[in-house]
Amino acid sequence: MNFRNNIPSTASVAYSLNDGRLSAPAAERNAGPIVDLVMKIAPEKGQALEIASGTGQHIVQLAAARPKMTWQPSEVDQLRIASINIWSKDKNLVNLRAPVFLDATEVGWSSKYADQNFILLINLIHLISESEARTIIKEISIALAPGGRSIIYGPFQRDGKLTSIGDKSFHQSLKEADPEIGYKNDAWMISQLERAKLQLVKVEQMPTNNLAFIFEKPLI
Ligand SMILES: C[S@@+](CC[C@H](N)C(=O)[O-])C[C@H]1O[C@@H](n2cnc3c(N)ncnc32)[C@H](O)[C@@H]1O
């Protein structure tokens, strides 16, 4: 999968369902709480972009749950783009666009995805460097329409600390694979949102010790 090719395989496990679809156990497990959160936060209608859609398991559920919103999946990995295509065809949702290749760490991608009313990013920030994460946040800020909302979800440090044994060992394995990557701190995330002129709405505690940063682009 990974664009950074030195990420441990445990960081993104997905199994083939033999019809081109991939199934990620983690995506399956966290889908319920993520869909519930998005239903509370995302507007009823408009344009939604998902960055790093993975297998496609989340976006098909979101598109079904928010039918008046148009959902755009995106990925860097061709096998995952193929998987999203097949999950999408299976569900036959008119409000779900075909997946596109999008490297979210590339400066300037926002110019092709302007005026988004909602942007979702799940489980990527710990797999990239601080400078790449900063680029993503800046690009999200430009891509959002005024008043548009976004959620960045994943594992993070709290107050500079890793708060479970599982998080400590996962963060350690990421650092060993690539010293530039690993869990970002919650305060660092908030400072990057402020720097990108985004307004924090809430940091929500999610199951299995994940956090969801919910934020919006001010109207003026
Ligand atoms: C841990 S998986 C999470 C996938 C999905 N969001 C989920 O929660 O199931 C990380 C995903 O990020 C994608 N990815 C890696 N580098 C990326 C980049 N630079 N831009 C966009 N996506 C990227 C990978 O291909 C992979 O599908």
Image (cartoon, helix red, strand yellow):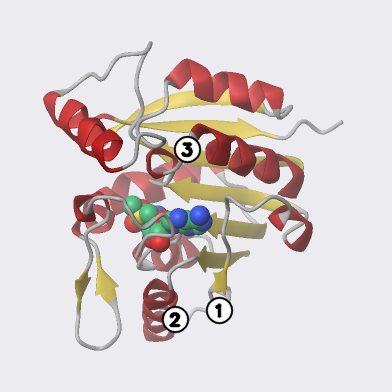
Residue in the image at 49% along x and 66% along y: 76
Q: Please give left or right for residue 38 compared with residue 42 in the image.
A: left
Identify whether 184 is placed above or below 187: below
Looking at the picture, tell me which residue is in the foreground, 214 or 178. 178
Q: Name the kind of residue labelled 3 in the image.
A: Ser
Residue occupying the far right of the picture: 220
Amino acid at circle 2: Asn
Please tell me in which quadrant of the rendered image residue 19 appears: bottom left
Between the C-alphas of marks 1 and 2, the distance is 6 Å
Q: Label 3: how many residues lie within 10 Å, few (<14), some (14-19) or many (20+)?
A: some
Residue matched to label 2: 85
Q: Is residue 127 visible?
A: yes
Instruction: Give the quadrant of ligand 1.
Output: bottom left
Residue most toward the left?
165
Residue 165 placement, left or right of 203: left
Compared to residue 125, the image places residue 191 above or below, namely: above
Q: CA distance from mark 1 to mark 3?
A: 28 Å
Secondary element at tag 1: loop
Residue 129 image label: 3
* Residue nearer the viewer, 159 or 73: 159
Left or right: residue 112 versus residue 194 is right
Whether the residues at callouts 2 and 3 have beta carbons within 8 Å, the answer is no
Task: Provide the secondary structure element on which disc 3 rests.
Answer: loop
Q: What secondary structure is marked by label 2?
A: helix
Q: Name the mark nearer the viewer: 2 or 3.
A: 3
User: Quick one: label 1 or label 2, which is nearer the N terminus?
Assistant: 2
First reached walking from the N terminus: tag 2 or tag 3? 2
Residue type of the residue flagged with mark 1: Ala
Quadrant showing the C terminus: top right
